[in-house]
Amino acid sequence: MTGNADGFNNSEDAFSTQSNGSTLGVVSPSHLPPEFYNAYLSTAAKERKPSPIRSLLPLESTPGLISLLAGKPNATTFPFTSLSFTARSPVDDGPETAISLTETELEEALQYGATDGLKQLRNWIVGLQQFSHGRKLDGGWKVSIGSGSLDLIYKAVAATVNKGDSVLVESPVYAGVLPIFQSRNCELVAVETDSCGIQSSSLRSILENWPVGKPRPKILYTVPYGCNPTGMTATLERRKEVLQLAREYNILILEDDPYYYLYYGDGPRYPSYFALELEEPEVGRVLRFDSLSKILSAGLRIGFASGPEPLIQAMDRHTGSSNLQTSTFTQVVAYKLLDAWGYDHFKIHTEKVSAFYRGKRDIFERIMNKHLSGLAQWSSPEAGMFFWFKLILNEDKIAEDGDSEAIIRTKAFDRGVLALPGTVFFPDGRKTAYVRAAFSLSTEPEVEEALKRLRQVILEARAEAKEVAGNKAGSRFW
């Protein structure tokens, strides 16, 4: 089956949000008006003008028009003459998919393209958002392609955050976005999380007790599936509570969801914020970010944002004046594969990918139980590729939690184990006993050896802590 934005399989299954008993997509709620977003756009976004050249590029397709507009290089000077590749079939024992670009497609791949992305790929993704999230393209939202989802998040933050603004971020938070927010010189307000996702009680407390006269935060950043670093997946109840608060306090949700298709939990897949907001009286408070890095190729550097048109347009203006566009070449390669698969085979592929990571998780956790029982605490992730575990650095568990920074950066590294100390994931950089470990690449023997080494490091740290405590007690006695 070939996938396109005008014809795709609407069958209800575990992949689609419609399978959760929801009425998503049945009733079309009203969209927030374009002027609503004026208060959310940063000064830079309001002042940024469209590219004088790129804003006119669509006119080149006018029949009979001779364009002298853009400084596009002449394709006859390009050395590439053909491109073909093969891809594994998503279906077990299925034949490889052989794909070749036509002369016209190759010419398009090698030339400058649209700021917001290859039209065919954008259309395919629009169809994917209906297939996966029940979102029909109804004029209130649009899609834009970026050089990875982080590129789009950077532009979204630049479009919505001014110097000194307060921004809500889940805590711990993906360390990769912290420099983005910090570069805006904004105040990061940590919202506590647990194994069920953002603690809505924490979010409500922050908003209800916000200082009088101080502007409230306009945006909330969250990774709801397989959160990096904690591995947590937000429950349906928490998502609905957060959406309710977003409506109550007029907050935009930046839904960073690179692990949505890496869900391997036993229960049904929870609807995304992007899907759930269809049940709200008004739609338009969710700006969603997806990535092909975890499911097709990290090197393709393709992510996509879906959300309110005024916000996407502000991001596109940023692209037009910075990197012009995402590589047309990689977009064409990705589109040709996705179009050959269609949505059903894309679903099969992502299910196989998530099953692969579930197997990697199970191996890692089995070996953790073998070497770190009693020395660490953790919750089993249901999506993504990370374990977030707390080192028990004192035999007396009532004692202070400890700090993983020195243990991981020095002692563990000296023994040949590299992981991330948890402090880098907290907006305030506070000390913590937590550690993030990725299980995506390591083989079972490597995991066995790494956790055996880490066990020894923890035991030595506990012995040192016990000796220090004994010396302190002795000095008090004398």
Image: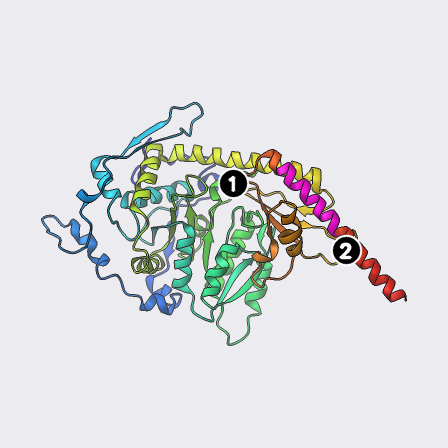
Q: Position of residue 203 (x, y in %)?
A: 56, 61
Q: CA distance from mark 2 to mark 1?
A: 39 Å
Q: As drawn, is 322 to the left or to the right of 288?
A: left
Question: In the displayed structure, would residue 233 be above or below residue 362?
Answer: below
Other residues around mark 2 within 10 Å, as few (<14) / some (14–19) / many (≥20): some
- Depth check: give the residue in front, 218 or 362: 362
Q: Position of residue 361 (x, y in %)?
A: 58, 38
Q: Are marks 2 and 1 in contact (CB under 8 Å)?
A: no
Other residues around mark 1 within 10 Å, as few (<14) / some (14–19) / many (≥20): many
**What stretch of residues is rendered in magenta?**
447-461
Secondary element at tag 1 = loop
Secondary element at tag 2 = helix
Residue for badge 2:
465
Q: As drawn, is 66 to the left or to the right of 246?
A: left
- Identify the amino acid type marked 1: Tyr
Q: Does 231 appear in magenta? A: no
Question: Which callout, 2 or 1, points to the residue nearer the camera?
Answer: 2
Q: As drawn, is 170 to the left or to the right of 159?
A: right
Q: Position of residue 73 (x, y in %)?
A: 20, 49
Q: Does 456 appear in magenta? A: yes
- Identify the amino acid type marked 2: Ala
Residue for badge 1:
263
Q: Earlier in the sequence, mark 2 or mark 1?
A: 1
